[in-house]
Image: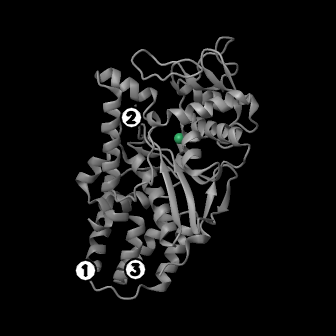
């Protein structure tokens, strides 16, 4: 029924152009590779996370509905400062905390009907690969050793290009996030340089390495894992827009310095931020709507539909009233789904595919769902909901 999704075009953050995502044929099978930066598992997921992962789920389902397999990797950052800080504060073992919150993330997203990633590698289980990547960057002169092993940003042309930031604006963001660190002969040469390997605090995990015992810096994990599981160049790299700088900027610099192949990603896709009570939803501000809270107030399919009724790249404000409106749409869809399936309207499916092919225009795709409901076209409603709401549409 679907037209092939091969005409999918998405806007690449780096070039600010729409990129055609033609799949590559590997082992006789058409496939796309997708890497999405996952959670740091130290607190329950909120609607901002659910928005990002639901959007990439629509991408996966849409591409796969056209007969193209997506090889999807989403990492779990279980080695990270906020995780250790939380474990310290609560007197809990970091590993137990990480395992529990990773399970919560998977439970939330399963409730929201995602097609689970093919792989969810944990940083703590990838240390060998990460060290090997750090070693190679050091051996080829892209990194230097002082009190830690730092990536030398001056060796990579175009640092800042992905996030379209000037040096000044990058420095400002690092300062705001408390990531600037100290500059000096015993430390960083340039405030933009970032650690690949660093010493661990006494209560943090530590691994032996030729750079001394310690743990990876934040960014190197994703270069190492993307390369291990998806190859030296990937089709789509995704994540929340707050990761664009410094995380993705640094990941791109590391990966292209390791492989001397550009681009590391054919398309970078960044999701917008979700606001609540007028401000960005964030743990530090405490203005969160957790996935579990939304699921108490509305069926999972309604939560999914509400999330995907926003454009992936834009910021938006969470609103309980709007969630209730999505719940009413799902109720009407369920009434239509009780009717026998006929032939789905070709015009509706064509418009739905055209919407998602055009940079994943989900608000436009949701309008086709409303049209299918009005026409009582059960087959079209089912087809559209399968992609927009995933398996949440079945519960
Ligand atoms: Zn990442």
In this rendering, would 133 be left or right of 336? right
CA gap, disc 2 to disc 3?
Answer: 39 Å
Kindly identify the residue that appears in the image at 46 percent across and 22 percent down.
Answer: 206
Image quarter for residue 190?
top right
Where's residue 293, x and y in %?
27, 47
How many other residues sit within 10 Å of disc 1, few (<14), some (14-19) or many (≥20)? few
Image quarter for residue 395?
bottom left
Residue 2 seen in the figure = yes
In this rendering, would 215 be left or right of 137? left
Give the label on residue 338, or none. Answer: 1
Q: What residue would you read off at disc 2?
A: 283
Q: Nearer the viewer, residue 49 or 253?
A: 253
Q: Nearer the viewer, residue 243 or 169?
A: 243
Q: What residue would you read off at disc 3?
A: 380
How many other residues sit within 10 Å of disc 2, few (<14), some (14-19) or many (≥20)? few
Q: Nearer the viewer, residue 128 or 22?
A: 128
- Where disc 2 sits, the SS reads loop
**Disc 1 residue lies near ligand 1 with CB under 8 A:** no
Q: Nearer the viewer, mark 1 or mark 2?
A: 1
Where's residue 306, x and y in %?
37, 59
Residue 325 seen in the figure = no
Kindly identify the residue that appears in the image at 55 percent across and 75 percent down.
Answer: 4
In the rendered structure, which disc, 2 or 3, sits on the residue that comes first in sequence? 2
- Where disc 1 sits, the SS reads loop
In the rendered structure, which disc, 3 or 1, sits on the residue that comes first in sequence? 1
Q: Is residue 355 above or below residue 254?
A: below
């Amino acid at each position: 029924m679907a037209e092939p999704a091969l005409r999918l075009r998405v806007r690449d953050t780096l070039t600010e152009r729409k990129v055609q995502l033609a799949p590559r044929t590997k082992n006789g099978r058409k496939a796309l590779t997708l890497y999405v930066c996952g959670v740091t598992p130290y607190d329950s997921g909120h609607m901002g996370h659910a928005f990002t992962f639901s959007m990439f789920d629509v991408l996966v389902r849409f591409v796969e509905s056209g007969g193209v397999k997506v090889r999807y990797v989403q990492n779990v950052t279980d080695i990270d400062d906020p995780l250790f800080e939380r474990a310290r504060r609560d007197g809990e073992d970091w590993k137990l905390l990480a395992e529990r919150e990773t399970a919560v993330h998977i439970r939330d997203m399963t409730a929201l009907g995602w097609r689970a990633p093919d792989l969810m590698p944990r940083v703590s289980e990838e240390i060998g690969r990460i060290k090997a990547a750090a070693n190679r960057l050091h051996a080829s002169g892209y990194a230097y050793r002082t009190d830690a092993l730092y990536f030398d940003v001056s060796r990579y042309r175009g640092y800042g290009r992905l996030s379209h930031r000037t040096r000044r604006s990058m420095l400002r963001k690092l300062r705001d996030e408390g990531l600037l660190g100290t500059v000096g002969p015993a430390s960083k040469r340039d405030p933009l340089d970032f650690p690949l390997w660093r010493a661990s605090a006494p209560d943090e995990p530590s691994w032996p390495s030729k750079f001394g015992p310690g743990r990876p810096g934040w960014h190197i994990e994703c270069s190492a894992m993307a390369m291990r599981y998806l190859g030296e160049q990937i089709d789509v790299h995704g994540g929340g827009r707050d990761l664009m700088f410094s995380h993705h900027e640094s990941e791109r610099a590391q990966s292209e310095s390791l492989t001397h192949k550009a681009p590391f990603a054919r398309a970078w896709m960044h999701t917008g931020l979700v606001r609540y009570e007028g401000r960005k939803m964030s743990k530090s501000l405490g203005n969160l709507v957790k996935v579990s809270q939304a699921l108490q107030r509305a069926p999972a399919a309604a939560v999914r539909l509400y999330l995907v009724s926003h454009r992936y790249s834009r910021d938006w404000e969470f609103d309980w009233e709007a969630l209730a409106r999505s719940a009413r749409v799902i109720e009407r869809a369920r009434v239509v789904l009780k009717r026998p399936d006929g032939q789905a309207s070709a015009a509706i499916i064509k418009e739905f595919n055209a919407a998602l092919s055009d940079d994943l225009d989900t608000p436009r795709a949701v309008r086709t769902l409303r049209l299918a409901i009005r026409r009582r076209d059960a087959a079209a409603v089912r087809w559209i909901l399968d992609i927009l709401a995933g398996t949440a549409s079945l519960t």
